[in-house]
C-alpha cells in the first residue's frame, strides 16, 4: 500500500517555515525534539525535492508545530491562511491561469482545474466537483480522506476560498465539514 503523501512542491513551505522560526529563535531545538517524530526531524535536515512525495503525517506534524508557534490560539484560521497564501503563490506563477477565472467562467471547467491541482498535490483521496445552483454555488467532495489531516482540510479550505473570492464578482462563503472520518465536503455559496 502506498503511503498517503503530499508532493514536495506543496510540502516545501512547512519545513522552510519551521527552519525560519528556528533561526529567528521562535522555536528551539527542544521544541522540535518534543513535538516532532524522528522522521519529521530527519526531513528538516534534507533538501526538499519538489517532485518527490513526502508522508502527509510528517506534513501534519510540521504544520501542527507551526500553529503552536504562530497561530496565537487560532489554529484553524492559521491553516486557512496558509492555504490562501499557497493559492496566491500558485496563481502568481501563471501556470494555472484558470484559477483567476471570472464568475461566468467558474462552472465545471474551473472546478476541474481545482481537482487537477489537488490530485497533483496528494497521492491519496478522490475529489469531485459539482455546481449546486445556477447562482455560482458549488460543492467539492473528498473521499478516501481518512488520512487527510484536519490541518490539510483547513489549508485546502483557505485555498478554495481564495480561488472562489478571486473568481466571483460577489462575496463567497466557503464552508468545510467532515461528515465522516473518510469524507470531507467543501461548499461555496455566493452571499446575497
Image: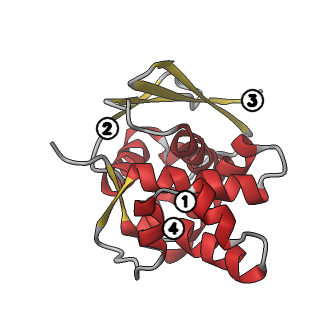
Residue situated furthest left in the rendering? 1
Name the mark nearer the viewer: 2 or 1.
2
Whole-Å distance between the Cαs marked 2 and 1? Answer: 25 Å
Who is closer to the viewer here, 36 or 139? 36
Please, what secondary structure does the residue beneath circle 3 have?
loop
Q: Nearer the viewer, mark 2 or mark 4?
A: 2
Q: Characterize the local packing of mark 4: few (<14), some (14-19) or many (20 or more) Cα atoms within 10 angstroms.
A: some
Q: Within 10 angstroms of label 2, few (less than 14), some, or many (20 or more) residues?
A: some
Q: Position of residue 92 (x, y in %)?
A: 56, 73
User: Which comes sooner in the sequence, label 2 or label 4?
Assistant: 4
Q: Label 1, secondary structure: give it.
A: helix
* Residue beneath the point at 55% across and 37% down: 150
* Sequence order check, earlier mark of 4 and 1: 4
Q: Which residue is mark 1?
A: 100
Front residue of 178 and 112:
178
- For marks 1 and 3, give the CA distance: 19 Å
Circles 2 and 1: CB atoms closer than 8 Å? no
Q: Residue at x 46, y 27 (%)?
A: 184
Q: Name above or below for residue 23 compared with residue 11.
A: below
Amino acid at each position: 500500500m502506498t503511503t498517503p503523501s503530499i508532493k514536495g512542491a506543496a510540502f516545501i513551505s512547512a519545513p522552510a517555515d519551521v527552519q525560519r522560526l528556528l533561526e529567528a529563535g521562535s522555536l528551539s531545538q527542544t521544541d522540535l525534539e518534543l513535538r516532532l517524530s524522528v522522521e519529521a526531524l530527519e526531513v528538516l535536515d534534507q533538501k526538499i525535492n519538489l517532485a518527490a512525495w513526502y508522508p502527509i503525517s510528517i506534513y501534519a506534524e510540521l504544520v501542527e508545530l507551526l500553529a503552536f508557534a504562530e497561530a496565537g490560539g487560532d489554529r484553524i484560521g492559521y491553516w486557512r491562511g496558509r492555504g490562501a497564501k499557497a493559492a496566491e503563490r500558485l496563481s502568481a506563477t501563471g501556470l494555472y491561469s484558470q484559477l483567476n477565472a471570472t464568475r461566468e467562467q467558474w462552472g465545471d471547467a474551473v472546478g476541474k482545474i481545482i481537482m487537477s491541482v489537488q490530485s497533483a498535490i496528494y497521492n491519496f483521496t478522490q475529489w469531485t466537483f459539482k455546481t449546486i445552483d445556477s447562482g455560482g454555488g458549488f460543492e467539492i467532495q473528498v473521499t478516501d480522506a481518512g488520512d487527510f489531516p484536519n490541518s490539510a482540510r483547513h489549508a485546502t479550505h483557505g485555498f478554495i476560498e481564495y480561488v472562489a473570492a478571486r473568481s466571483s464578482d460577489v462575496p463567497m462563503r466557503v464552508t468545510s465539514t467532515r461528515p465522516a472520518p473518510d469524507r470531507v465536503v467543501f461548499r461555496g455559496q455566493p452571499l446575497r
